[in-house]
């Protein structure tokens, strides 16, 4: 029979395994402490010799133990007990080798050894009497005993190296078999798990076998002794239930409020349906409920990514990560606020943004079509966000709107404001509102290019005074001010979670509630009240952007000019809605996407936008002289290196600059820091300068190799001559920038920074400046500008001329400014002597 007796504790129902030799004795349950007496069976033979119980057995300390087996290296036994008479070290073969002839192979898992063979004991049990203990790890055999060495150790002197058994070899005599023990081997106890997930079970964690677990499970399948786990799951379920109830209690009123705000009136969501009930148009978005059929229209134009001028901010940026474009979202919010229909069958909101490529034909065409399709009963709003320039034309000064490709030096690429006013005057609409959100400037970015100067008196007059009678004009900033933009600016001192991103004027419309509330079909758009409420929010944001300075260094004032119409044409529901028109398509020209990809480079500064020239129209006949003549793969073929040395120098130069300014490199260029300037920060800055110490020689090598092949330039095609000029100009401009940036980092280590007020600022940020601080290396930029100027003339009408003019206007100077990383900003300081903080 088995060597153990299975029983159940009558007190705690825990399964017990009791050695058969303890039959008839009293044993103690280790879990509950109850004393249990087992019945003895007359046919149960006692084991031949007592077997030491494993340390992990729950009853190990209750049973008798035998003396430890002989082990000369056991500090408690070695040297006291003599070797057993049957000790034969040859019976233990090295790991990885089969046993010698006459010795058994290990039995398969689950099978006991055959009678008479001293098979190794299971883990946790000592060997039977007369057999040696295994050697401890790392110990050699005692003198005179050729005990197998642990892995990694050689055999003792005088003993041969273990080798696989070869029955044909006669070099080693066959050992005599080990005599069987005089008494039969005791029953093999159940093995104790060696480890579970790397942890050996000890007395504090009882290993539960499947048999014990099955015995101790109740009817429902839960295991006894697991009450704490069951209680924990009940606690989790109760917590989830409470959270669900709380969520319903809080969420229902919250979403109800959102719905009321979206409908602009909680009790009368649709002016065309005063009794309430379902909306008249099931396809209408909830944001425009109540606008269906109202005689209102909106034309929203915003140009953000200019070719030659400072870009506009259209997205948030937190820790260098740019958010989604907010232009369409802002247009939809204005349409909602002024109750402009945006139904599937009657959408009167028209948007021109970077997605539509707002070139002059697109912008001017959209204005014409919008004004021409208005009805006499319509209340219309035109919004323009972008840059405005003035030019002296004959004997008077005129203002111009700037499309995406607009060049301030070429009036043919601009749209006269006087023409817009003339078309607005001729429009049939009964109420006309124009919003000029111009002179845009983001203090966190600085002025990378022209176009973000404060509004002048001349611009303010030209945008307001020519307005026809009955036309209202909203000017989002006044002379001496900018229409401010932000990446992530707080505007509420009581709620720092309220942030502004993009145009302050546009984004703050979120917090002007009820501008279109209770509007009827015959009511005008409430321009004066709405603008007055918004002006307070814009002014508050500008004051906070000045970091609390007295009087505020930033100011932005929203004002309404012009006059409202004396009388409005009544709404007529029987008249067909105003015609929905298709936006004009940008002009088509030769495809230059592949050409631009050959010389495109990442922006030098992180805030600059990429010039989107791939779809830009260029005259096909002009580009015919710049056709491709050799591919990069052909240049790099074996044997072509000398033939295409000029082209390879250009290509490899572009590749190096792309690598230095790629994503991996840009991540090493900081543009701000917070906290005090301590040794930790200086060490970080030092590591960043280490990157510059590698990047700068790489760009210098590019310039050296390009200048080495310059004598070959006259023999090259016009395409590769243009590529070469652009590569050389950029290598010089980027070298100047790397030295300027290195100096800026050095100013942190030497603490040569503008003074800051710890109460207002918690760090510094790096912004663009038109003046470079480096002296000697500034000459690189001067030479780059000379090349850009020549390219504008030499390659006129081509992509190289556009990028040369664009990059020529880029400001590469850098300056540290105090700022508050939580959202408060300070405007650019005038040039001042550096002081040590």
Image: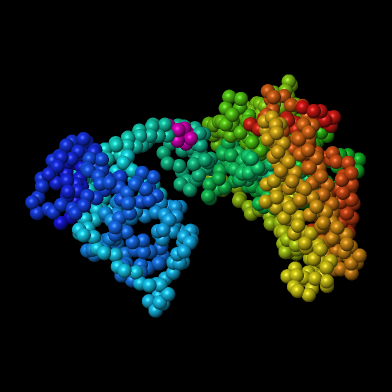
Seen in the picture, residue 370 relative to 707 is either above or below; the reply is: above
Q: Is residue 79 at all visible to an observer of this figure?
A: yes
- Magenta includes 500? no
Residue at left offset 72%, top offset 24%:
757
148 vs 778, left or right, is: left
Task: Work out which residue is located at the far top of the displayed protein and give it.
Answer: 550
Task: Give the camera-side residue of 176 and 486.
Answer: 176
Seen in the picture, residue 721 relative to 495 is either above or below; the reply is: below
Q: Main secondary structure of the magenta part?
A: helix
Residue 682 sits in quarter = top right
452 vs 100, left or right, is: right
Image coordinates of residue 770 in percent, x first then y, are: 83, 40
Q: Is residue 269 at all visible to an observer of this figure?
A: no
Task: Give the camera-side residue of 758 and 638.
Answer: 638
The quadrant of the picture occupied by the N terminus is bottom left
Task: Give the camera-side residue of 587 and 692.
Answer: 692
Residue at left offset 38%, top offset 32%:
246
Residue at left offset 40%, top offset 72%:
172
Task: Give the camera-side residue of 541 and 456.
Answer: 541
Residue at left offset 46%, top offset 66%:
161
Image coordinates of residue 50 in percent, x first then y, are: 22, 50
Image coordinates of residue 328 in percent, x first then y, are: 61, 45
Seen in the picture, residue 42 relative to 720 is either above or below; the reply is: above
Q: Give, as a single range, the part of the protein colored magenta.
A: 252-260
Residue 323 sits in quarter = top right
Colouring rule applied to residues: rainbow
74 vs 759, left or right, is: left
Task: Work out which residue is located at the far left of the displayed protein and give it.
Answer: 42
């Amino acid at each position: 029979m088995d060597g153990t007796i299975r029983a159940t504790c009558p007190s705690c129902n825990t399964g017990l395994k009791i050695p058969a030799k303890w039959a008839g004795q009293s044993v103690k349950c280790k879990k509950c402490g109850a004393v249990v007496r087992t019945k003895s069976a007359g046919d149960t033979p006692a084991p031949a010799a007592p077997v030491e119980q494993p340390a992990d057995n729950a009853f190990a300390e209750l049973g008798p133990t035998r003396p430890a087996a002989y082990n000369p290296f056991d500090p408690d036994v070695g040297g006291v007990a003599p070797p057993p008479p049957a000790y034969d070290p040859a019976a233990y073969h090295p790991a990885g080798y089969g046993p010698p002839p006459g010795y058994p192979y290990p039995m398969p898992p689950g099978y006991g050894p055959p009678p008479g063979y001293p098979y190794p004991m299971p883990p946790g049990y000592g060997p039977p009497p007369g057999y040696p203990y295994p050697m401890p790890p790392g110990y050699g055999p005692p003198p005179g005993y050729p005990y197998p060495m642990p892995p990694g150790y050689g055999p003792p002197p005088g003993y041969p190296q273990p080798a696989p058994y070869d029955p044909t070899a006669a070099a080693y005599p066959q050992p005599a078999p080990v005599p069987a023990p005089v008494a039969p081997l005791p029953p093999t106890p159940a093995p104790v798990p060696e480890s579970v997930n790397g942890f050996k079970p000890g007395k504090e964690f009882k290993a539960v076998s499947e048999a014990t677990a099955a015995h101790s499970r109740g009817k429902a399948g839960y295991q006894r002794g697991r009450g704490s786990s069951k209680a924990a799951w009940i606690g989790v379920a109760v917590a989830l239930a409470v959270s669900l109830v709380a969520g319903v209690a809080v969420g229902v009123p919250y979403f109800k409020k959102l719905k009321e705000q979206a409908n602009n009136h909680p009790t009368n969501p649709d002016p065309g349906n005063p009794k309430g009930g379902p909306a008249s148009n099931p396809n209408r978005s909830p944001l425009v409920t109540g606008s269906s059929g109202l005689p209102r229209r909106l034309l929203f134009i915003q140009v953000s990514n200019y070719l030659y001028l400072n870009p506009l901010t259209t997205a948030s940026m937190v820790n260098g990560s740019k958010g989604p474009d907010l232009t369409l979202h802002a247009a939809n919010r204005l349409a909602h606020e002024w109750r402009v229909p945006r139904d599937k069958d009657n959408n009167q909101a028209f948007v021109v943004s970077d997605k539509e490529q707002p070139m002059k034909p697109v912008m001017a065409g959209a204005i014409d079509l919008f004004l021409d399709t208005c009805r006499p009963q319509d209340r219309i709003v035109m919004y323009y966000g972008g840059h405005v320039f003035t030019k002296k034309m004959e004997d008077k000064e005129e203002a111009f709107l700037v499309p995406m490709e607009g060049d301030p030096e070429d009036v043919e690429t601009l749209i006269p404001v006087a023409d817009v006013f003339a078309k607005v005057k001729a429009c049939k609409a009964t109420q006309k509102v124009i919003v000029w959100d111009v002179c845009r400037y983001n203090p966190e970015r600085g002025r990378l290019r022209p176009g973000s100067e404060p509004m002048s008196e001349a611009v303010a007059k030209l945008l307001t005074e020519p307005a026809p009678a009955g036309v209202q004009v909203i000017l989002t900033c006044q002379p001496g001010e900018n229409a401010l933009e932000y990446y992530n600016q707080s505007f509420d001192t009581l709620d720092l979670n309220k942030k502004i991103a993009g145009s302050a004027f546009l984004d703050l419309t979120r917090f002007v509630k009820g501008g279109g509330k209770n509007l009827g079909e015959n009511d005008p758009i409430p321009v004066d009240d709405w603008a007055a409420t918004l002006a307070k929010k814009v002014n508050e944001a500008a004051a906070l952007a000045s970091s609390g300075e007295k009087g505020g260094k930033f100011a932005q004032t929203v004002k309404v000019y012009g006059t409202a119409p004396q009388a409005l044409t009544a709404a007529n529901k029987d008249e067909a809605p105003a015609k929905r028109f298709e936006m004009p398509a940008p002009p088509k020209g030769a495809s230059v996407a592949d050409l631009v990809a050959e010389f495109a480079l990442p922006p030098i500064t992180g805030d600059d936008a990429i010039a989107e020239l791939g779809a830009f129209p260029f005259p096909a006949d002009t580009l015919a002289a710049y056709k491709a003549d050799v591919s990069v793969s052909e240049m790099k073929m074996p044997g072509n290196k000398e033939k295409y040395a000029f082209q390879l120098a250009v290509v490899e130069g572009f590749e190096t600059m792309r690598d230095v300014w790629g994503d991996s490199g840009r991540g090493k260029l900081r543009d701000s820091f917070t906290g005090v300037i301590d040794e930790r920060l200086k060490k970080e800055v030092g590591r960043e300068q280490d990157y510059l110490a590698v990047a700068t020689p790489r760009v210098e090598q590019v310039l050296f190799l390009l200048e080495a092949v310059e004598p070959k330039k006259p023999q090259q095609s016009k395409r590769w001559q243009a590529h070469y000029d652009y590569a050389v100009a950029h290598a010089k401009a980027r070298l100047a920038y790397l030295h300027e940036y290195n100096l800026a980092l050095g100013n942190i280590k030497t603490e040569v920074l503008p003074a800051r007020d710890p109460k207002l600022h918690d760090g510094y940020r790096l912004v663009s400046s038109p003046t470079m601080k480096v002296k000697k290396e500034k000459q690189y930029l001067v030479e780059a500008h000379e090349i850009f100027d020549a390219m504008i003339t030499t390659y006129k009408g081509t992509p190289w001329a556009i990028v040369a003019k664009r990059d020529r206007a880029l400001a590469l100077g850098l300056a540290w400014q105090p700022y508050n990383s939580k959202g408060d900003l300070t405007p650019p300081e005038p040039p001042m002597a550096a002081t040590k903080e």
